[in-house]
Amino acid sequence: MLKATSNLPVDILKLNLINSFDNVILDKLIFYKKIIFVEECYKIGGVGMLLESSLSELSYKGDFYHFAIDNEFIKHS
């Protein structure tokens, strides 16, 4: 995990290869009070959904915010 370069207590996790979340990452994330996950894919079936599900299985008690594209038809011009 990378430390953000500001005075805010923030960590940044950059996923270069998305296969699954290993226990090392999940064991660290489980102690965070708030997780904000941003992705450029659809919300349902995306990586954020996988992470939220994995944390839920570990009884994650913090807040999880997932920002992604809603699963609806996208109109083209």
Image: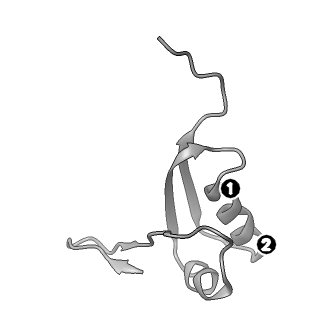
- Name the secondary structure under disc 1: helix
Q: Residue 32 location, x and y as percent? A: 52, 76
Furthest residue to the right? 57
Q: Residue 2 location, x and y as percent? A: 35, 79
Image-quadrant location for residue 22 = bottom right
Q: Amino acid at mark 1?
A: Met
- Name the secondary structure under disc 2: helix
Q: Residue at x 66, y 33 (%)?
A: 71
Image-quadrant location for residue 8 = bottom left
Q: Quadrant of the N terminus?
A: bottom left
The reply to whether discs 1 and 2 touch (Cβ–Cβ < 8 Å) is no
Q: Residues within 10 Å of mark 2 (few under 14, many from 20)?
A: few
Q: Residue 19 location, x and y as percent? A: 66, 70
Q: Which mark is residue 57?
A: 2
Of tags 1 and 2, which is closer to the observer?
Answer: 1
Q: Residue at x 47, y 11 (%)?
A: 77
What residue sits right under mark 1 in the picture? 49
Q: Amino acid at mark 2?
A: Glu
Furthest residue to the left? 6
Furthest residue to the top? 77
Q: Is residue 43 left or right of residue 4?
A: right
Disc 1 to disc 2, C-alpha distance: 12 Å
Which is nearer the eye, 29 or 34?
Answer: 29
Circle count: 2
Q: Residue at x 75, y 77 (%)?
A: 58
Which is nearer the eye, 52 or 42?
Answer: 42
Q: Residue 45 location, x and y as percent? A: 72, 49
Q: Residue at x 57, y 62 (%)?
A: 63
Q: Work out whether mark 1 precedes mark 2 in sequence or the reverse, and give the earlier one.
A: 1
